[in-house]
Structures are given as C-alpha cells and as structure tokens.
Image (spheres, helix red, strand yellow):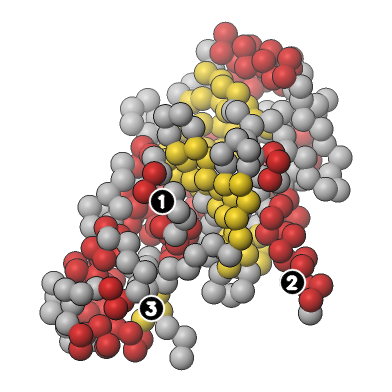
Amino acid sequence: MNKTALLGKTLNELKTIVSELGMPSFTAKQISEWLYKKRAFSIDEMTNISVRNRISLNERYELGRTLPVQTAASTDGTVKYLFKTSGGHFIETVYIPEEDRATLCVSSQVGCKMGCQFCMTGKQGFIAQLTTAEILNQIFSIPEAEKLTNLVFMGMGEPFDNTLPMLQSLEILTADYGYAWSPRRITVSSVGLIPGMKVFLEKSNCHLAISLHSPFAQNRLDLMPIEKSYPLSSVLDELRKHDFSKQRRVSFEYILFEGINDSMRDAVELVKILRGIDCRVNLIRYHTIPGVNLKGSGTEKMTFFRDYLTNNGVTATIRRSRGEDIDAACGMLSTLEKEKKESEV
C-alpha cells in the first residue's frame, strides 16, 4: 500500500485527516508543529501524540522526507543536491551561500515542457510534476536548512506549469502554522506562463522573476518557444496591472549571449519595453551546456549593458556566477543520473 505524505499538507488538510481518523481536532496543530517547526523525520517522533494515534497515522501516512542521494560541492561554497522522487526520477536543488545570505534554488518539476534553447532541463523534456511534499522536502532535508535566508524557485521546471503544488508550498512556507517566512524572502521565476502567473499574483505576495532574455519577439522566440503562446508583450501588459513599488518586487532575468542579445539595440529596446514597470534586471552569465551553440557575453559587454540600463532608469545588476566547477547549470547533474539509469536497463 502506497502511503500518503503528511509533509506538504496545509493545516486545514491535517484537520480533515485527523477528523477522518477519529482523533482530537487539536492533533492537527500538533502534527503541523512536528512537520514544520520541529522538522521531524518520522511519525514516531511525534511524542505528544498518543501511541495509538501514531499507529493509526502510520497505517495510512508517512512523513514524506527523504535525504539527498548525491552531493556536489563547489570551491566557492555552492552545493548541488540530487534528490530522488517517489517516481524514481531525479531533481536538483542548489545551496548558494553568500556573506549576508544563504539562498536555496528549488525545483518544481522533473524536466520541463518549455524547451528553452539554453536550458539543460528543457533538453530532458517534461517527465513529471513534483508534489508539494517533494518541493518542500528540498528545503527541509538539506544539511543547511537552518541557515537559509532566501528561496528562489529557479531550479528544474516551470513553477506556473505546476501551479497548485507550488502555491501550496508557498502557503506552508509563509503561514504561521508552517515555516512562517516573510514572502519577501521567496522569489518565483517563470518564463511567463500567464494563466499560472495571474493566479500567483492574486494569491501570493512572494516576489516574481520573469525570464526575458531578449526584448525582440522573434529573437526571444528563437531562444524560448513560450514566446509563441504567451508573448512577452502580453506578459508585460499583465504586470502593468499590479503595483510593484512596495513590498512585492518584480525582476527580469536576462542571460547575455554573445552576438545574440547583447547589442546597443537590445539595450535600448529593453529600456523601452520596461518603461512604467517598477523593476530590476538581473544580468546573468551563461553556463554552457552540451550540444548548444551559444556563447556567453564577456565581462566588458555585461558591464556596458548594466551601465546603460541603470543610466536610463532601469536598475540592473550582474549576478555573480556560482558553482561552475560542479555543473551548476540546472539539469546537468540530473541528466547525467538519468542517462546512467537508462544505460543500466
């Protein structure tokens, strides 16, 4: 019998579970504290719940936490973790320590449907959705869990193609009964899947990051097939309906590719299309991946691009490149593990 994970359940869902099992209603709060405050690994650790009720829980449920199956550590302190999902697939989670923060890059799917030219995860194709438990397990089950200050949903997959489990994980992370984090510590990144983005903007106060990568429609389409279904112009129109001048922030991710999107013409157009949106642009160095004929722009070009944007009213920063010696680009480690598994069949 496959047991259901308790990890990833909201307080209301836990109340339903204990009611169905004939337990006192306060047991739901006790379970949530063991899950999200004390971060238990098993139901048997829940010692303020009666032995009989723990036995009853164990018959149908499991806690749902699993440890990473592989670790790769970079010389710069970045650590990539490989987790195995309940379906036997692999996902990656990256811990990025800095002087004043410790960020975890979280995956939302196994593989991805979006097919971006520059992304190794996209080369895998879509394999499976992650459950809320599998999303949260990445956060709770790394050795550095207690050190985390920020979360970014920028790992494998498109978060707004798995909207409900992603939103449920955000609820638990920010709720008083859960992790009790401020939404300002969490950023969700998307290629601009508008239906999911709209739900997210209505139901969550977490930050939003949009993968932009070119201000010109045809050029962006060459890099990102999503441009055909949800054009960047439509994404920006939707964003203009929301106020990002206060606690919530919107940013744009922009990988600079040599000779593709790093010209003065690109910089001028980027300033033009972002006019009226209170935002920042994160300029990113390209991590090369096998079989893709793209080359990252040099430091001089990145510096020019940043300075032009900033001097023309669009705040821009160059994101520090991390973990290059451990194939930190999303999808590299899991692809290797996937190929290894397939070769053994």
- Depicted 12 relative to depicted 117: above or below: below
Q: Residue at x 86, y 40 (%)?
A: 293
Q: Residues within 10 Å of mark 2 (few under 14, many from 20)?
A: few
State the image quarter where residue 272 is shown. Answer: top right
- Depicted 260 relative to depicted 27: above or below: above
Identify the residue position indicated by label 3 in the image: 62
Identify the residue position indicated by label 1 in the image: 145
55 to the left or right of 124: left
Q: Residue at x 57, y 41 (%)?
A: 78
150 to the left or right of 290: left
- Where's the C terminus, which quadrant? bottom right
State the image quarter where residue 18 is shown. Answer: bottom left
Q: Residue at x 47, y 41 (%)?
A: 103
Label drawn at residue 341: 2
Q: Which amino acid type is shown beneath numbered disc 1?
A: Ala
Could you tell which of marks 3 and 2 lies nearer the N-terminus?
A: 3
Q: Residue at x 28, y 73 (%)?
A: 45
Coordinates of residue 122 in the picture (x, y in percent) = 71, 53
Distance from the alpha carbon under mark 1 to that under mark 3:
21 Å
Q: Which amino acid type is shown beneath numbered disc 2?
A: Lys
Distance from the alpha carbon under mark 1 to that under mark 2:
29 Å
